[in-house]
Amino acid sequence: MRDLTISEIDRLAEGAADAEDAELMLSMDEDAFRLFYERTSRPVWLYLMKMTGDSSTADDLLQDTYYRFLRTHRSYESDEHRRNYLYRIATNLARDGRRRASSAAVVASDAAAEGTMVDEQARAVGRADLDRAMRRLRPRERALLWLAYAQGSSHDEIAGSLGLRKSSVKQLLFRARKRLAGLLGRS
């Protein structure tokens, strides 16, 4: 297969979908995988980081997620279907890791840097409060909220990623938001 030019990669990344590009994206040759990895690795790592609370664990799980993804040799209906399956693998690995660990220590939140402005300190305190509250949520609640609000996933995508019925996602999200608000001291 020929090498892709920068403009072709940009066109693929922007979602250009003529027949040849679609076939390339769904075939998952090395170039297509590299492009898929570049677009998805950071969001998946952030998701795993929120699920586990530890960056080194997130690194390990990210590597294992892509390894298992490539081992499956499945065919996918679309790039979105491929992404949902990737999140499903990541979710299952994070769950398995929690089951194996008897009890993990919670990573302390980063302190605000010295000499920052009041606004930045307030945001840092808010982030720390949110991080602490997110860690107190159940793993499924944390995953639901992260996928919905940090990743912007639709209810269909969340259902596919977490192995839930689409009809239950709305109610589960409502409960997770309510519980998070309670942990943050808001009604």
Image (spheres, grey):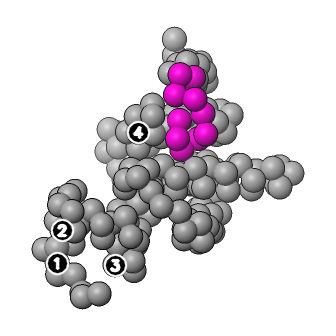
The residue depicted at 38 percent of the width and 70 percent of the height is 27
Identity, as a three-letter code, of the amino acid under mark 4: Ser
Amino acid of disc 1:
Ile
Q: From the viewer's perspective, is residue 159 above or below residue 21?
A: above
Label 4 sits on a secondary structure element that is loop
Q: CA distance from mark 2 to mark 3?
A: 13 Å
Query: For numbered disc 1, what is the local secondary structure?
Result: helix
Question: Which of the two marks, 2 or 3, is nearer to us in this view?
Answer: 3
Residue 157 included in the magenta stretch of the image: no
Q: Which residue is mark 1?
A: 6
Cα distance between the residues tagged 4 and 2:
23 Å
Please rate how many residues cluster around mark 3, counting C-alpha atoms within 10 Å: few if below 14, some from 14 to 19, many from 20: some
Q: Position of residue 124 (x, y in %)?
A: 44, 43
Instruction: Give the camera-side residue of 67 and 46.
Output: 67
Q: Earlier in the sequence, mark 2 or mark 3?
A: 2
Is the magenta region chiefly helix, strand or loop? helix
Which residue sits furthest top? 187
Q: Which of disc 2 and disc 4 is earlier in sequence? A: 2
Element type at marker 3?
helix
Task: Judge whether residue 149 can be spotted in this image.
Answer: no
Q: Name the disc covering residue 31, or none.
A: 3
Residue carrying label 2: 10
Label 3 or label 4, whichever comes before in sequence order:
3
Could you tell me residue 94's position as x and y percent?
67, 53
